[in-house]
Image (cartoon, rainbow, N blue to C red):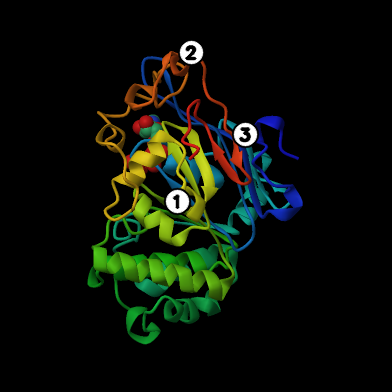
């Protein structure tokens, strides 16, 4: 079972992926360290979509990469079924990693321009020695005509089509969990909707479990069953999507939500804007990391770091003064 600080995690036998107290660090020059992710914990039931949202630099991509152990996190646990990924090495890690696939933000640069689509999509299957016969099926599943698309190269496709190719490349390995790291951020708005719709369809068809990362809460809210809001490497709030949208409790979540046109959240102007830039994660503020930009900050917020704690069943928040109305 999860430790007391991670009481929002469900019992292990109910979840496919369980992440506990994840810590990711990078060297930041002059002997300093940046803690990009600090104490992040969440779980995913099979077939569920968890959205992770927060502004640039809050640690979303570092969290995503730590799930697939690229690189392995500095601390914490990532458990897929009964398999603890953080202690796996070599062939055992490689074999388990196939079950978790990633889709990235920039589809064009993540595809090798010199190779034909068939080779790109089947690349992983050659490493695995299986799945090569699924290339046509997955190309068709992502909406590309295998007969014409497979022999072309990435530059002959639009950004949206390249993202379809990336999705096919992930799907061909029959993953259980697909981690989508800002999959639509680089695409035109009209294309974004198509790719989001495609991911929803594929999730049903292949019984996928999704982690969906975006800086834009407007995108995340429509595709996620639950949403985790991160700020400067830490968890702010975690709740079912409708609960988080209808009753956001953390001042950061509230400001993110109020910035979405038509969100229905009518905040006083001071609460609506997130002032200034995020502080440096190399030297984060004492106490609550959001306090330097928070309209509700009080002296306690500088002295004491808020633990993540329950508001109602399934709704968790790390704030000394959450909105509870
Ligand atoms: N390889 C690295 N070396 C040093 N610092 C890094 C590295 N990768 C990320 N960081 C730092 O870790 C912090 C979190 O970065 P991360 O990319 O995970 O955030 P993010 O929320 O995904 O942001 P974005 O939306 O811009 O990708 C940032 O301060 C970033 O500068």
The N terminus - image quarter? top right
Q: Which residue lies at the image location 40% right of the left edge and 40% below the top edge?
A: 253
Q: Which residue lies at the image location 29% right of the left edge and 63% below the top edge?
A: 113
Residue 151 in which image quadrant? bottom left
Of tags 2 and 3, the one toward the viewer is 2
Kindly identify which numbered label has been placed on residue 303: 2
Going from the N terminus, do you reach mark 2 or mark 1 first?
1
Residue 281 screen position, x and y as percent? 39, 25
Mark 3: secondary structure: strand
Which residue in the structure is indicated by mark 3? Answer: 76
- 4 sits left or right of 294 in the view: right
Report the label total.
3
Residue labelled 1 has its Cβ within 8 Å of some atom of ligand 1: no
Q: Where ligand 1 lies, by image quadrant?
A: top left
Of tags 2 and 1, the one toward the viewer is 1
Going from the N terminus, do you reach mark 3 or mark 1 first?
3
Local crowd size for mark 3, using a 10 Å CA cut-off: few (<14), some (14–19), many (≥20): some
Camera-nearest residue between 161 and 18: 18
140 up-or-down from 99: above or below: below
Residue 121 screen position, x and y as percent? 44, 69
């Amino acid at each position: 079972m999860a430790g007391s600080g991670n009481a929002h995690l469900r019992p292990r036998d109910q979840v496919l992926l369980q992440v506990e107290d994840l810590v990711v660090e990078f060297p930041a020059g002059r002997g300093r360290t940046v803690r990009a992710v600090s104490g992040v914990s969440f779980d995913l039931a099979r077939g569920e979509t968890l959205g992770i949202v927060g502004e640039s630099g809050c640690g979303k991509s570092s969290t995503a990469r730590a799930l697939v152990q690229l690189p392995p996190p500095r601390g914490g646990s990532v458990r897929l079924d009964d398999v603890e990924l953080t202690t796996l090495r070599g062939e055992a890690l490689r074999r388990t990693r196939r079950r978790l696939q990633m889709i990235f933000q920039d589809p064009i640069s993540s595809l090798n321009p010199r190779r034909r689509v068939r080779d790109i999509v089947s690349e992983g299957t050659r490493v695995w020695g299986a799945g090569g016969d699924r290339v046509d099926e997955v190309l068709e599943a992502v909406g590309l005509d295998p007969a014409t698309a497979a022999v072309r190269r990435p530059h002959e496709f639009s950004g949206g089509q390249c993202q379809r190719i990336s999705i096919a490349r992930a799907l061909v390995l029959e993953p259980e969990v697909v981690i989508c790291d800002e999959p639509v951020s680089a695409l035109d708005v009209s294309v974004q909707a198509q790719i989001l719709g495609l991911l929803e369809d594929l999730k049903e068809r292949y019984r996928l479990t999704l982690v969906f990362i975006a800086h834009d809460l407007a995108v995340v809210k429509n595709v996620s069953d639950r949403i985790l809001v991160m700020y400067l490497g830490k968890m702010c709030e975690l709740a079912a999507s409708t609960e988080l949208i209808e009753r956001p409790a953390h001042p950061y979540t509230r400001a993110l939500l109020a910035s979405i046109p038509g969100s229905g959240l009518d905040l006083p102007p001071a609460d609506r804007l997130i002032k200034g830039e995020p502080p440096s994660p190399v030297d984060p503020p004492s106490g609550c990391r959001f306090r330097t930009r928070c309209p509700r900050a009080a002296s306690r917020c500088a002295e004491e770091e808020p633990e993540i704690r329950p508001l109602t069943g399934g709704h968790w928040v790390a704030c000394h003064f959450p909105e509870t109305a």
